[in-house]
Image (cartoon, rainbow, N blue to C red):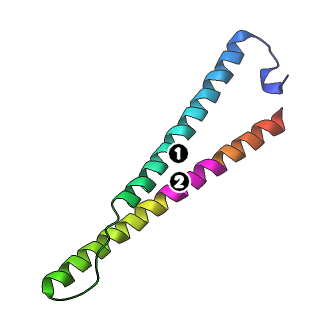
Amino acid sequence: MPHFLRSADFLHFGIFALWSGLGIYMAYVIAGWSALFTERSVDTWSEVSYIKLNRADEVEIAKSEVANRNCLLMGGLGLIGSIGVNVAVAVVATVIASHL
């Protein structure tokens, strides 16, 4: 039995189970938010023709470039969040496994 559950009573096991469940739920929620950011960035990407026929085309191209830059930022944040959750879960699992 792990040393943090040496006193094999139901209360300590329940506390351990609740904290474990909370950690799993938080990882699930943060990974969901990261996926949502990435999905929104892909969905809002604007495809614009870069043919400049008049001044209005230049304005629209500039607007879409800013919007696409924001999409890249949001997608990058989503990717970093997903990687961060994966690394955090791996570190926590390694720490817990080393204490077993």
At a point 61% along the width and 22% down the height, the residue shown is: 18
* Numbered label attached to residue 81: 2
Of residues 8 and 45, the one drawn nearer to the viewer in this rendering = 45
Residue 63 falls in image quadrant:
bottom left
Image position, residue 85 (x, y; %): 59, 48
Residue 65 falls in image quadrant:
bottom left
Instruction: Provide the secondary structure element on which disc 2 rests.
Output: helix
Report the Cα–Cα distance between label 1 and label 2: 7 Å
Judge from the rendering whether residue 4 lies leftward or rightward of residue 28; answer left or right: right
Indicate yes or no whether the magenta region holds residue 11.
no
Main SS class of the magenta portion in the image? helix
Please name the residue that numbered disc 1 is placed on: 31
Judge from the rendering whether residue 41 lies leftward or rightward of residue 60; answer left or right: right
Judge from the rendering whether residue 9 lies leftward or rightward of residue 77; answer left or right: right
Instruction: Provide the secondary structure element on which disc 1 rests.
Output: helix
Of residues 89 and 98, the one drawn nearer to the viewer in this rendering = 89
Placement of the N terminus among the 4 image quadrants: top right
Judge from the rendering whether residue 20 lies leftward or rightward of residue 30; answer left or right: right
Tag 1–tag 2 contact (CB < 8 Å): yes
Residue 95 falls in image quadrant:
top right
**Number of numbered discs on residues:** 2
At a point 78% along the width and 25% down the height, the residue shown is: 4
Image position, residue 64 (x, y; %): 27, 73
- Say which amino acid is labelled 1: Ala
Which segment did they paint magenta? 78-87
Q: Which residue lies furthest to the bottom in this view?
A: 53
At a point 48% along the width and 63% down the height, the residue shown is: 76
Placement of the C terminus among the 4 image quadrants: top right
Q: Is residue 38 above or below residue 21?
A: below
Q: How busy is the neighbourhood of tag 2: few (under 14 within 10 Å), some, or many (20 plus)? A: many
